[in-house]
Amino acid sequence: RKKLYPEGEITHMSSSELMEERKSERVTDEKQKDERIFCHRCYNLLHYNRVTSDTWQESLTTDKSILSFLKKKEDATIVTVVDIFDFPGSLLENLDSLIGTDKQNILVANKMDLLPNDVNETRIKRWLYEKCKKFGFTNIRDIFLISAKKNWKVQELAQTMSTIRSGFDDIYLIGKTNVGKSELINSFLRCMVVDGWRHKVTSSPIPGTTMGMLGLPLTLFKETFGVNPKGFHFPQTSRHLFDTPGIINENQLINLLTEEELKITIPQKYIKPLTFALTPGKTVFLEGLGRIDYVEGQKPIRITVFSRLKPHLTSIRRADEICQSMAVGDQTFLQPPIFSSKRKEFPAMIKGLKKYAMKGISGTMSIKDIVFSGVGWVSVGGMFDKAVIDVWSPNGMGIYIRDKPL
Ligand code: GDP
């Protein structure tokens, strides 16, 4: 460990930055020559794809074991982060039983900047609570809709964390990978840090990293955490805000993508929804990552696409031909996947959901959301009696139906 924590600057990266580093040849070829000093978590993720290599700490790294660790821990306040753009795919299931219901837990829905800005926040919070209940998570003290990237509501979140945590609790950020936990830590630092620590996450040796998690002493956040509600200063040098290793979201479609493909898939800014009609016998593709066939029905259905990927309309017959081409590694106009000499194979598109029947309602409200995890979603609605659809994705992965749309 000493080798990893000499005096000086420590580099801490977000999961996506680490992913990019791992793909670059620098990691394998220049491992020995790399002069950067990484925090424990980053070093191990980068070179060994594990969170830490130390004996007892190893148990913390095996994915969900972080949750059993927290279940036993009494002095912990939890902040559960989800990605609003990938919900419920980014939610940890059965959290009540995994970490217990004896702790304060704040639910944070991140990446709100991707949604249209006229969304009704009260309705979304209610919607999130209902969905979480369905997935075994009811111990929610408060819900925050934030954008870590844009620092929206981050200050308010920190204030609530400070109010509800008892003076001797550490704070743990938990969530699946890619929900934006590192970005949230950065946002806390951008918004709240005093004493010249502004804008720095790659910074001096930070106690707490030995747990395989980035731990920022709460004393850093003096204005927010330094004083308890009664006005006394706590001796908080040993209390931390921990960014825990993200739990891998195996079902997420973006796991399949190369760096180049991620660049054209991951939404960076507000998504403008696209609405059109789909008639029976037709297909809509979300590039090569999603496909919905309207297999049975009388009337057109109304489709609204929330994704950075472009929708393409065609007939089911033509869609089958396109999928056959993709399955043998032929480049099509649908990208991603981008086939190249390096990458000839990609999981074939198959039906993850077959003959899914929807009953229509009159009016203009959407009745179902079909989510392609990490890529976006498609709302289906319109004035029809019954519509039957098939939903496809690579390997049939990452498809969720939301009964009551966002
Ligand atoms: P982690 O795995 O939970 O630590 O996630 P990261 O912090 O690495 O973020 C994953 C991806 O989501 C990165 O591409 C971030 O740029 C992006 N991201 C994080 N927060 C936000 C946000 O508030 N809005 C948007 N649009 N993207 C975000």
Image (cartoon, rainbow, N blue to C red):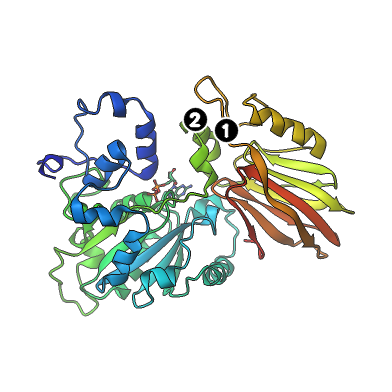
Q: Secondary structure at mark 2?
A: helix
- Horizontal relation, residue 346 to residue 248: left or right: right
Residue 404: horizontal and vertical position, in percent? 66, 65
Give the quarter of the image for residue 309: top right
Earlier-in-chain disc, 1 versus 2: 2
> Of the residues shown, which amino acid type is indicated by label 2?
Glu
Residue at (33, 66) in percent of width and height: 68
> Of the residues shown, which amino acid type is indicated by label 1?
Phe
- Horizontal relation, residue 340 to residue 284: left or right: left
User: In the image shown, does 46 or 184 lie closer to the viewer?
Assistant: 46
Q: Secondary structure at mark 1?
A: loop
- Relative to 17, say whether 74 is above or below: below
**In the image, which is nearer the foreground, mark 1 or mark 2?**
1
Identity of the residue furthest to the right in this view: 298
At label 1, counting other C-alpha atoms closer than 10 Å, the crowd grade (few under 14, some 14-19, many 20 or more) is some
- Horizontal relation, residue 44 to residue 258: left or right: left
- Relative to 202, say whether 166 is above or below: below
Q: Quadrant of the C terminus?
A: bottom right
**Marking on residue 346:** 1
Name the residue that disc number 2 marks: 260
Q: Quadrant of the N terminus?
A: top left
Residue at (20, 25) in percent of width and height: 33
Residue at (66, 54) in percent of width and height: 370
